[in-house]
Structure formats: C-alpha cells, structure tokens
Amino acid sequence: MSPKNIVVLYWHRTDLRLHDSPALHAALALNPSIFIPVWTWDPHYVYHSRVGANRWQFLLECQTSLSNSYKSLNPNQQLWVVREGPTTVLPKLWKIWGVTHLVFETDTDSYARSRDGEVQQLAKEAGVEVIIRMGRNLFDPDELVRKNGGKATMSISQVERAAEKINGGEPAKPLAGPKEIPDAWGIEKMKEVEAIKTEKIDATPDLNAEVRGGVENQYERITGPKGDFGVPTLKEIGISESSVTTPHRGGEEVALKILKECVEDEEYVGRFEKPNTSPADFEPQSTTLLSPHLHFGSLSVRKFWWDVQHVLEKRKGAKKPTSSVPTNLPGQLLFRDMYFAAQAAVGPAFATTRGNPVVRLIDWHLQSKNLEKDGTDDKRGDGTREYTVDSPEAEEWFTRWKEGRTGFPWIDALMRQLKQEGWIHHLGRHSVACFLTRGGCYVSWERGAEVFEELLIDHETACNVGNWMWLSCTAFFAQFYRCYSPIAFGKKWDPQGDLIRKYVPELAEFDKKYIYEPWKAPIADQKKWGCRVTGDGSISKSEDGQTYPKPMFDFDKRRQICLDSMKSAYDVGLHGADKDVMNGSWEKK
Ligand code: FAD
C-alpha cells in the first residue's frame, strides 16, 4: 500500500502523551497520509467505574494538554474526542474515514482485554489492520507472567527474576516524541460522523448519576456540543466545578516538569528510601506524586525509570549511600509492574475475593453477596456490588471511615485529604487501609478498594486492589500481627500534628499533647481551643464552637479482636478460588 492510501486511526487510551509511546511511534512509522488521533468516550468508564470529580478533571486536563501538543506540531490537528463507546463507534469511523490501520497501546486490565478483543475482531471483519504495542509498563505483564512460570508475580524478587530473563532486567529505552504529525481529514469530512445516529446507552441505576445525566445528553452527538470533537468541559459532562477540589494538575507538560525537577535533585533521587518518606508531609509531599500521570499515561514509566537510573548510575561511588531495590525509585516502579503482572495472570477475579486464587479468605464483617459462580461479581452489570451486612455497627464504622469522622484524627485527616485532593502518601494509604480491615474495623478490603477507586486520581485497578490485598494481609503480605496504630504511627512522623491541623481544622488549636487523642483533653481546654469532643459521631458547629467525635471504638480492644479473628482465618486457610468458597459453604465455618 502506498503511503498516500494509508489512513491511521490512532486510539489513545492509557497513553495521553507524545513522548515515548511505542504505539504512536509504530503508527507514524507507517508514514500515513491521514492520521486521526482519537479518544473514544467509553461507557465502561462513564457508567461502570467509580470516577470522582477530581479524577474527571485530571483526565480532561491530560486530554487538553495532548490536544494542544498535537496542534503545536500541526495546526490542523488535535485530539479528536468521539462521544460514543469504542465497540460501536469505531466500525462506523473506519467506514466513514476510510481507515486502513488501527493502532493502540496494550492494556492488560481485564475489562480492556475483552473490549480490545472485540474491537480486534470487528477490525478483522472490516479489513482494518490492527497494530498494538506495549508502553504502559516497564515490562510486558504477560511476558513477566510467562517468565515467572505462568504464575502471578507475588513478590518483588519474582518480578526481578522474571525481568532478568526478558532483557537482563532492563526496560526498553524511551523513544523520542514526534517532530511532526500528518494531517487529519479536513473538518468537513471529519464531521460526516455527525450524520450517524447514535444510540443512547442504557441508563443503569448506579452511582455517578450526576455524571451520567450530563453524558447522556452528549451521546446525542458524537462530535460534542460545538461539533468540533473538542475536549469536554466539566459542565458538559454534568459535574459542577465546585466539586473539583484537587490542587494536582494533569497533562504531559506538567508530568515532564515534575519528573525534571525530581531528577535534577540528585541527592533526593539517590537517597530516596520509601519507608523513610513521611506520610505527613504536604506542600511539598515527600514522594514524587507522579502516580496519576502514570495512570493516564501523561508520563512514560520507562522515561521515569531511565531518568532516575541515570542519576543512580552517576552517583555510584558517591560518599553518601545510594538506596536500592525495593525501596528506591526504580523499586517503586517494579512494584507497579508486580501488580500489573499479578492481575494479568489472575484475570477479572483479581479485583474480588470470590474466584481469586491468590487471595486468602477472611471472614470480614461485610461480605459480597451477589457473586456469580464464574468469579465475576458484576451481576447487575453496572459495576456496583451488594453486601450483606452482618454487623450494622461495622457498617457505621465503614461510613465514618469513609467520611473522615472516626474520632481518630490521624485517620480522619488522611481520609479527608484523600477526598479533597485525590491523593495521599503510600504510608497514609497503609494506615487507613489497615485500620478499615485487619487493624480496627474488620471490614472487607473490597469495600475499601471501592472507596479508593472513586476518590483517587491515580486509581489503577491492579495497584489498588493489589495493595488492598497487601494491607489486609489477604495476599502478598502475611504478617497480620504487625498493625498500624492510628495514634502512635502518625505521632512518630508528625509530632506537632500539622497534617491533622490542616485537614481536620476543627482541631487546629489543640495542644500537640492532645492532637492525636483529643478526647483526653480537659473540657476547659476543649472549650478554650474552640472544639468540643462529643460522643455522637457528628461534626457540627454550635455557639460554643465546633464539635469533633469521640473515637468510634476502643482501638486496643478492636486490635485484639482483629488479631484473634485473623489467626483463626489463617488457621482455616481458605482462598478465594477454593471450592468451598465458590459454592458458599465457607460462610458456615
Ligand atoms: P512514589 O513513591 O514517588 O513512587 C513512584 C511510582 O511508583 C508511583 O507513582 C507509582 O506508580 C509506583 N508505586 C509506588 N509504590 C507503589 C505500590 N506500592 N504499588 C504500585 N505502584 C507503586 N498506586 C497507584 O498508582 N494506583 C492506585 O490505585 C493505588 N492504590 C493503592 C491503595 C492502597 C491501599 C495502597 C496502600 C497503595 C496504593 N497505591 C496505588 C500505591 C502507592 O500508594 C502509590 O502508587 C503512591 O503512593 C503514589 O505516590 P507517588 O507517585 O508519589 O509514589
């Protein structure tokens, strides 16, 4: 085929960037006469996932940044945002625009695999050639699994050994971004898609009704309200601007700037030891905060790896010791790959207990109820789950945890930071996840993971559920007797309680002696500091000032109950894919 007949539809999904994108590189290497970079509005993302306003905003900023980058290389170009699901809209676009090649980055998430399989089949039937390249991870997750004997990667050393067999443990070197971009069709031909009558997506009774309402209107037209395939505004997708509260900004330019500043500080990179970074630091935080950029692909993980690696190489022989895997920065990126490969090996059951061969079964208070025997848990088809509540008390604890009113200021500060900003430090995530599960409430890790899914701007299914399993000691980590105290752990990092003062402002005036245990402060002091510690779990304002709740339980007692229960569950030794679990008989044990 001569280049003049080559029409490439480039499908952006997990790679909202121009730098180091192997798939984009492959697409441009075809030397197409027409190149159409699109983003398709995926109903799975819109309806079935829990996406909070902060993550929406971050996504739109990444899209805007990418669109601007295209425009700067070719004034006739942009990111063409198509408002319809890929499996229905792509075949129509191939036909209308005469597409010869479809190119995209590999996505090994379970939903993406089935969607992409369907798209590939449709492309085959339409005679469109499909080109797929890996660029989302350091190492291809499927390849890591193969090199790990076909098994899920459950430790960093397994990942290191498997990676060693791929390329001597070295990820591929980053590719330069394009210097020029071919034209898309003229706007008139692009707009021919307006003639397509789009079906309305079934409204499903899930959360995000606010979002759904806005998007349904958009489905009326593929090209957006202005008919220009532009990046939607928050208003268009039904989210009020006031619900966006994160200070963290999206986009390739922002990501590259953060990385540059990080690697320019060679001392920081060289001495980075994750366990020594403080969960209480904010403005600036103690770790890179590049996770949302890796999630949306506004930063290439291989560029991150190599830029850091160059600094570590330079520092070899430096007087001050250089940290090593798994605590250094490359080690952090290997953890990311570990969870991706574990998910790739297990499949859809990785995100649940039922059917999951790597997860240990614990008799948590709240158990999933609407599970199918085949291991999927999406019976209603809308991504939500139902739970039997065997303890109304635990349900109350869960709600108070989620809303940041447990009465433990360290936990509440972190949960409010998460809600407000969409990001908290890794050890902050440790604290709140341990507290909800094996170190306090004894509530299922799946419920905690759902809250994180909604609130995190860096939400990544593999990393989220993988880390929840780790923290709840259901997989990856088994030392359940090592538990985070909601008082002593925070105090160790932040004796003055600055994180609490910022995110739990009602306690801002408390003396540091009481900031982690305000219920111990004398009433006269509570009055003096403008906040009364009360018993009803609420936070309110009265003439006497504000109120803050008493702790929702005696932590030491709860810790002992959790430890005893974990020990019993470990003694029973069932896993999520055991026969007893699959047929429900474990519930009687
Ligand atoms: P840095 O310390 O600067 O690390 C650099 C990069 O390494 C991160 O951006 C991230 O991509 C990767 N990384 C670091 N630690 C981990 C880890 N333990 N697991 C996987 N990747 C890691 N991370 C997500 O990206 N998405 C999630 O949805 C997510 N959910 C989590 C849920 C729980 C309960 C816990 C305990 C951790 C979760 N993590 C998740 C992992 C980790 O907390 C974040 O990746 C990290 O805090 C992001 O901040 P950073 O970019 O400053 O990390």
Image (cartoon, grey):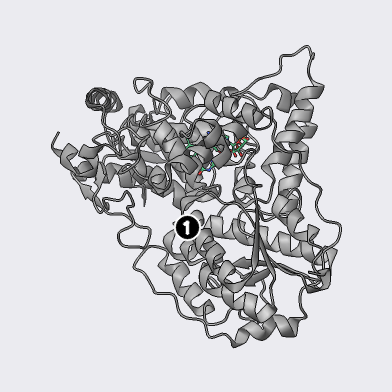
| Residue situated in front as seen by the camera: 70 or 528 | 70
Up-down relation of residue 329 to residue 29 (above or below):
above
Crowding at mark 1 (Cα within 10 Å: few <14, some 14-19, many 20+): few
Q: Which residue is mark 1?
A: 114
Residue 245 as seen in the image, left or right of residue 560: right
> Residue at the spot x=65%, y=37% of the render?
288
> Residue at the spot x=62%, y=50% of the render?
247
Mark 1: is the Cβ under 8 angstroms from ligand 1? no
On the image, the x and y values in percent for residue 271 come to 69, 21
Up-down relation of residue 484 to residue 372 (above or below):
above
Residue 364 as seen in the image, left or right of residue 16: left
Residue 268 as seen in the image, left or right of residue 195: right
Q: Secondary structure at mark 1?
A: helix
Quadrant that contains the C terminus: top left
Residue 169 as seen in the image, left or right of residue 213: right
On the image, the x and y values in percent for residue 328 come to 64, 25
Quadrant that contains the N terminus: bottom right
